[in-house]
Amino acid sequence: MNIRALTGLNLLLLAAAAPAPAEESDELQEVTVTATRRSENLQTVASSATVFSGADMAKLGVFEPRDLAEHTPGLLTKFGPNGLATTGFYIRGVGINDFTGTVDPSVGIYVDEVFVPTPDMLNFAVFDMQRVEVLRGPQGTLYGRNSTAGAVNFITAKPTHDLEGYARAGFGSWGSKTAEAAISGPVTDRLLGRVSISGQWAPRDRGYSLNLFDGSHQGFKDDIAIRGQLQWLPSDDLSLRLVYTYGNKRDDQPLLQHVGARDPNNRSQICAPVQAGQRSEGQCVDLLGYFSASSNPYTGNSDLDPFLQMHTHDVALTTEWKLSHATLTSVTAYDKFASRQNQDIDASPFVAADNRTRNEVENFSEEIRLTSDDSLPLKWIVGADFAHTLVDWFQTIDLTDLINLPTSNGADQSTRAAAAFGQLIYSFNTQWEATVGLRYTNEKRGWHGATFVGTFPNLTAAIASGAPILSQIPVPATSPYAGTPLDFPDSLTDSKVDYQAILKYKPNSDLMYYVSTARAFRSGGYSSAVIFAQDALAPYGPETLTSYEVGMKWTLPEAHLRFDTSAFYYDFKDFQATFVRSTEANARLQNAGTVHTRGLESSLEWFPIHRLTANLGVSLLHAEIVQSDVVLSPLNGGPPATISGNEVPNAPHYTVNALVRYDAPLPGNYNLGLQTDAVKVGAHFLEPNNRDVLRENGYYLLNARVALSPAQGRWEVAAWARNLTNQTYLSAAQDLIQSLGFAEVVLGQPRTWGLSVEYRF
């Protein structure tokens, strides 16, 4: 990384931090977080973090988890390479680009402290939130499974002792409509309740994505989410909160974009433009000779109507019991999830890769921990957690027009994860503090799956049919290993000790320095994608990330400013990624080598004058695969070589987030809220093969919002727009160039707008 650039960036931000000569200024508000499993001021937490309040998210238009990336340094969110069913989170370049339902996320996503076990479940509605905390860097010692990259905590609004609530409704682009409401208050003296609801709707044949195959627009939406809560307070020291969340989602999906990759005069050869890193439909075709002739990037020619359905039931019981000098916390949860998706992967009028996918997940989890209070110099946390996750994932990929081969593939997977953890925090004096944490995790994963010739509704039916099995040597039905890999175990057990050590120095109440090191891991497993060879069924091993970080947090009360910065280095071994080797025709999840990552993040929050807020966040990143045994053939037909030296996918060289908000007073005691925010995302590859034709060269998104409300009133009318300049950018891609003769691309959303009205009581 260019050290001069890093130094210059910090000098620029520090220059901006100089006190402003303003007669009237807003006071900095203390931000309380639970990032360390205890309530504390964000400026005293020795890690890089960004926090959004519920009001912030409403103004920024955070409707889904992926929307957070536009406002968070170092965070990138992506659609899955096969459409909207999966959502990928990447923090500092660490994430997982897989599209199967059996994979675990690298970023730990938590809703009220409950871990979300699969990326398929990350399309939930974000509504009626108290706050969201984005924690960057390994979080293995205090957070559960697979928080290698970091953790994102969604904390819902809790029941209140006083009656309160709100209602919000809106409409916008392509006939879309939204509604959200909540009511909270006492049921009895000791029983509190809260009910909230969120919905999004859009009519058929009104979306921005046009299917030329049948002339239909993809835009239908029918989403509903309901959350009910009861909080019982039998005594001043005991609290029990029961939360039930229901979600039902029925959406059209935007069409995938076709990227032809073969020479029309010799389809066994990669076309010259793709070799040169350029998409050129017409000069390049797929193996069937098809190319996309439309100049509109949001049109396609799909023989399969793409849609997505999701259904969720989530129940969580949180118990807190205040003891003498400690608090006992228990979080018990059960989640049930089901989804169905259709997507034309080849993005053509042919049956060359028509995909239908279903996924069913059941997850039970329990965490219990004992946390000391802050009355003693030595503070501590001890705890244990357990989770059992069942995944039934199955898909069909019809290749009939391409190779006259319909296929079905999938797996039944069971994961049992148990862990014990502890942390000690010792204050030597008012300036120096040390933290050490350990976590022991044991995960056992059982897997049962294969790839079959033919189309079947589920794995049981496929095995019972006796159909040829592409992904393994056939095993007699009487064998106890029927339907599982012959040469590989059908279960894996990984055990690991993670650690964290932090030294914190506070020379005064406004300044804090820290240095930390941490290690976290993500367990191994099996690729559940379509597999055409038995050796591709080899299970992948765990990945381990060791981080080293130094940081500073500086509050300047006189300047009404906060400035945070951190520099980090990652040694990331056996990182897991989904892509195609030269020796295979299928994309699969595998260990891809060792990655070294170095970077810097800085953020600034400033109130230069009364009513004006300015935020700035910058992330610089360099993440390189320094060692790999994965061999890849170049597109020009040259000798195969390893992917050592490649960049990891979805790791932009830089991101810049900015926000300016001004509340202008109007005559008649009204207020006009003016807000604009933007994100600039640097160039990055979308897959580990680093195909230039699938490289996103960088983009920026500009958003704006205008709101009118009484200065002390309860209502608000707002107008907003996102992606004002109508940028076209790539969100995800899958490299099938050498195997199937094409690649497919998922585009980000074009310009959207909306109007909303809100009332609070």
Image (cartoon, rainbow, N blue to C red):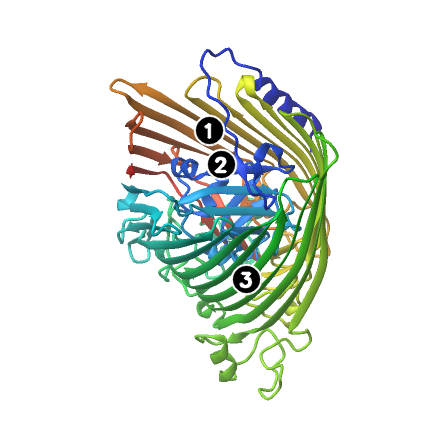
List the residue tagged with mark 3: 365
x and y percent of residue 332 in the render?
Answer: 52, 60
Quadrant in which residue 727 is drawn: top left
x and y percent of residue 635 in the render?
Answer: 61, 52
x and y percent of residue 644 in the render?
Answer: 71, 49
**Label 1 CA crowd tier, 10 Å (few <14, some 14–19, many 20+):** many
Q: Amino acid at mark 1?
A: Leu
Residue 547 appears in the picture as rendered: no
Question: If the image is split into quadrants, where does the N terminus sit?
Answer: top right
Check residue 71 in the rendering and tell me which mark sits there, or answer none: 2
List the residue tagged with mark 1: 659
In this rendering, which labeled residue sits more in front, label 3 or label 2?
A: 3
In this rendering, which labeled residue sits more in front, label 1 or label 3?
A: 3
Label 2 – label 1 distance at C-alpha:
8 Å
Question: Relative to the observer, which residue lies in front, 184 or 473?
Answer: 184
Residue ID at (46%, 61%):
288
Q: Secondary structure beneath disc 1?
A: strand
Q: Amino acid at mark 2?
A: His
* Residue 702, placed above or below residue 462: above
